[in-house]
Image (tube, helix red, strand yellow):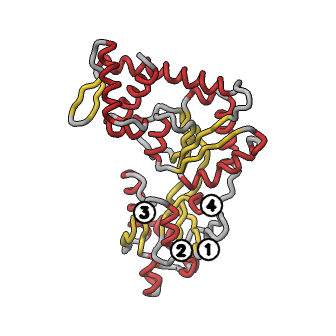
Amino acid sequence: MTLHQLRIFLAVAQATTLTRASKQLGLAQPSLSKQLATLEDSIGTQLFERAHKRMVLTDAGRLLLHHAQGVISGVDEAEAGLREFANGRRAIVRVAGINSVIKALVPDALRRCGGPASGIEIDIHEAAPGEVVEMLYARQAHIGLVAAGSVAQASIGFRQVPVVDDPYVFAVPRAINLGELKSLDDMPHDVARVLNNCIQFHFGTQYTLRVQQWYQRILPKHRLVAHCRTYEVALGLVRSGFGVSLVPALTAFLIEGSLEGIELFATDHGHRSTVALVADQYLRIAPYRGFVEALQAAGQNVALPPISPMPQIIKDASKRTV
């Protein structure tokens, strides 16, 4: 067996399809299939059952998976540790994560690590949670920043280190003056039209359902007018006066003009908890462990954007559900 074959085996076991594993590894599918077949021939037994385009581990495959994870982790740890001894070589920390958290925390974390003088080179990838996990498995990232619960627990073989919590806020066009609105029954027609136009960010089935239930409770006459894949697009639609949106506060992290035309209100929807996904071996090596600790410190001291008090319509809805 070669390390290359073991990495392919692990990628296929995690991805469960050759198509996804091929994408993760950047290898052509025929080449990947050939390497797997060579591995199975060399050990004399089948590692996967091929069923309806899915790759299901056999008993032998599950045994190899247990040992292969330890082998690859050990090799990765040795390689990362040896880089520290390479003369003149900078430590590269590859971070993949959701845009709002990267934007809010990474600059401060770099400053806490010593800035340009630290010798750390940062490689940043903005990606959705599912893509972050794929990059971690494919060794294209050392640290993943995702919302806790945004990826299936069964698919994660990484330590989850809490980094930052931010509250969900109600983003409303500033022209509406929601803070002065006492009741949904007293709204002018033009205000009611905008306030009942809800913009939803698609994150995952469970998250989407919770947000829909919140809209239904707060704005019983609402309608979904837009489905977005990024919070930035959702806030852009709010800014234009198209509708309103429930978003985590850090998605509106202050950059000049980012909240122009938007007011954020406190809600009763709770908080988003963000974690750093890190393989155990990286938590034992200085550059990566130090950067995770810097992310935690940055998260504890992050400055949230201005948030107005909870409006009366949300308070009234909260009372009705108690």
Q: Secondary structure at mark 3?
A: strand
Residue drawn at the location 59% of the way across and 46% of the way down = 124
Work out whether mark 3 precedes mark 2 in sequence or the reverse, and give the earlier one.
Answer: 3
Q: Secondary structure at mark 4?
A: loop
Q: Residues within 10 Å of mark 2 (few under 14, many from 20)?
A: many
Which residue corresponds to mark 1? 260
Q: Secondary structure at mark 2?
A: helix
Which residue corresponds to mark 3? 228
Residue 110 appears at what percent x and percent y? Answer: 71, 45
Work out whether mark 3 precedes mark 1 in sequence or the reverse, and give the earlier one.
Answer: 3
The amino acid beneath tag 3 is Cys
Residue drawn at the location 48% of the way across and 59% of the way down = 230
Residue nearest the observer in this picture, 178 or 35 = 35
Is 19 situated above or below 168?
A: above
Q: Quadrant of residue 56?
A: top left
Q: Secondary structure at mark 1?
A: loop
Is 279 situated above or below 229?
A: above
Residue drawn at the location 31% of the way across and 33% of the way down = 30
The amino acid beneath tag 4 is Phe
Residue 208 appears at what percent x and percent y? Answer: 39, 56
Residue nearest the observer in this picture, 180 or 142 = 142
Q: Measure how far apart labels 2 and 4 are at the Cα level.
A: 15 Å
Work out whether mark 2 precedes mark 4 in sequence or the reverse, and give the earlier one.
Answer: 2
Residue nearest the observer in this picture, 25 or 99 = 25
Question: Which numbered circle lies on residue 313?
Answer: none
Which residue corresponds to mark 4? 253
The amino acid beneath tag 2 is Arg
Work out whether mark 1 precedes mark 4 in sequence or the reverse, and give the earlier one.
Answer: 4
Residue drawn at the location 69% of the way across and 30% of the way down = 286
